[in-house]
Image (spheres, grey):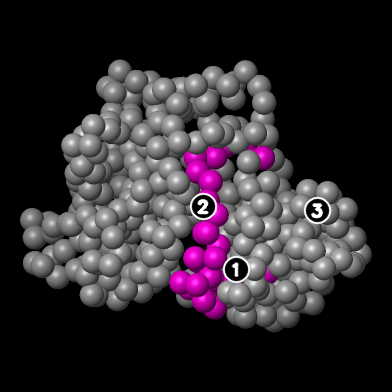
Amino acid sequence: MNNNTFKIYTSTNILPEKWNEVAIENEFLQKNYLSVLEKSAPVNMQCFYIGIFENNDLIGVALAQFLDLNKLTSFGERDKCLKTSIRNFVFKNFASHVLFIGNNMITGQNGYSFSKEMDFACISKIMDDCANELQRYFLKQNKKIHIVSFKDFYESCANELKKFEFKNYHEFNIQPNMIFHLKGKWETFEAYINSFTKKYRDQYKRARKKFEGITIKELSYTDVENEADRIYDLYYHVAKNAPFNTFFLSKNHFETFKKQCDNRFKIFGYYHENKLVGFHTILVNGKVLETYFLGYDETVQKDKMLYLNMLYNMTQFGLENKFEKIIFGRTAMEIKSSIGAEPVYMSGFIYHTNKLINKYIDKLFEKLEPKVTWQQRHPFK
C-alpha cells in the first residue's frame, strides 16, 4: 500500500509506454480510445488520465472526467415539467462542476484497470486520493468542484469498496445496464429467433416487414467524413430528446473515433431512398461487444421500426462473430429486454463538497434523478 503512487496526465501524448499493456483488458482505457476523448470530447468535458505505480512500475490506469454543466444549453428536452425545471436550476447553481472518477460517456465498469491483483482497500484509497488531488488542481484555477462521483461498479465490487474509503459516500443505483449474454446459447441467428415465444417471433416478423426498403451499409472512414453533418444531426436529435443529459458529443466525435480505432469501431448506416436516416455504432472490446451512440430520423423510425431493427442487427452481429455478451447500456430497458437483454444493476458513489448539502445528498438525489418505470420482457420459450 505504501509503495503505491499515482500521477495525473492531461495529454495522451505523455502517457507511460506500458499504458496499453496495463489496460489490455479494456478498450475504453487504451490509448486509442483515450485519444478519441482528447481530440473530440464534449465541449463541457475535460479528461484526465491516471497512472498508478508500484515502486515506479506502472501497475494500473484510470480515467477521470470534469464536466462543467454551465456550458450546456440543455439537459434534455423530452420531459417538460416543474420537476425538470427545478432540477435544471439546482444543477446549474449547486452542482455545475462535477468530477467523475470513471467514464460518464459509457455504461459499465470502465474506470480503472490493473495488471495485478489489487485489494479493494488500496483501490478505494487510490481513487479517493485522485479525486482529492483533482479538486486541488481546479481550486488553483478558481474552480470549485461541487460533486464527486465514482461511476459504475458491479454489485460485488461495490460491496467491497464501501467497506473502505467509500463507506461515507452515498451509494446510488439508477437505470440498470442491459446486458445480453450470448455465450453457449445459439449457434446461429436463426436459432436465436426460433427460441422466441410466438409473441416475440411475431414482433420480429413485423419489425422486419416494416424494415423493407431500408438498406444497411457499414461505413468506412471516408463515408463517415462525407456523412459527418448528417450523422451528427441524427445523433443530436436522439440525444436532446433524452430525459437527462450532462453532455453532448462534439461534431467531430464519430469521425475521430473511426479514424483512431478503425475496425474496432464500427458504424452502420441505414439508408432510405439513398438518404441516411439512421445509424448505430459498436465497439469491439475483446470478447465483449459494446454498443455506443446511435441516431435516427424520427419520422422514419416510427414507420420502419428502425430502433428495434437496430437491436436485432446488433444481436445478429454479436452472434455471428461469436461475442460472449453485448453491453446495450442504459435507456430503453423494456424494448432491449424484448430482444433478450437482462438488467444488471450497478452502483455509483457520490458526495457533495458542501457538507450541509452532502448531509441530505441521498434525499436530494432521489428527488432530482429522473425515474423510469418499465416492465421487463421475457421473450424466450
Q: From the viewer's perspective, is residue 253 above or below residue 146? A: below
Query: Could you give the CA–CA distance between mark 3 and mark 1, rounded to whole angstroms?
Result: 24 Å
Query: Could you give the CA–CA distance between mark 1 and mark 2, rounded to whole angstroms?
Result: 14 Å
In which quadrant of the rendered view does residue 50 lie? bottom left
Type of the residue with mark 2? Ser
* Circle nearer the viewer, 2 or 3: 2
Identified at 52% across, 24% down, the residue is 87
Decide which of 128, 263 is in the foreground and name it.
Answer: 263
For the residues labelled 2 and 3, say whether their Cβ atoms are less than 8 Å apart: no
Decide which of 377, 252 is in the foreground and name it.
Answer: 252
SS at mark 1?
helix
* Circle nearer the viewer, 1 or 2: 1
Identified at 68% across, 75% down, the residue is 218
Identified at 86% across, 57% down, the residue is 304
Q: Please report whichever mark, 3 or 1, sits nearer to the chain's N-terminal start.
A: 1
| Label 1 neighbour load within 10 Å: few <14, some 14-19, many 20+ | some
Q: Position of residue 164 (x, y in %)?
A: 24, 43
Q: Position of residue 125 (x, y in %)?
A: 20, 48
Count the marks: how many? 3
Q: Which residues are magenta?
A: 241-268
Q: From the viewer's perspective, is residue 251 above or below residue 355? A: below
Does the magenta-highlighted stretch encompass residue 256? yes
The residue under label 3 is 301
Q: Which mark is residue 6?
A: none
SS at mark 2?
loop
In this picture, residue 29 sits left or right of residue 311:
left
In which quadrant of the rendered view does residue 96 lie? top left
The residue under label 1 is 225
The residue under label 2 is 250
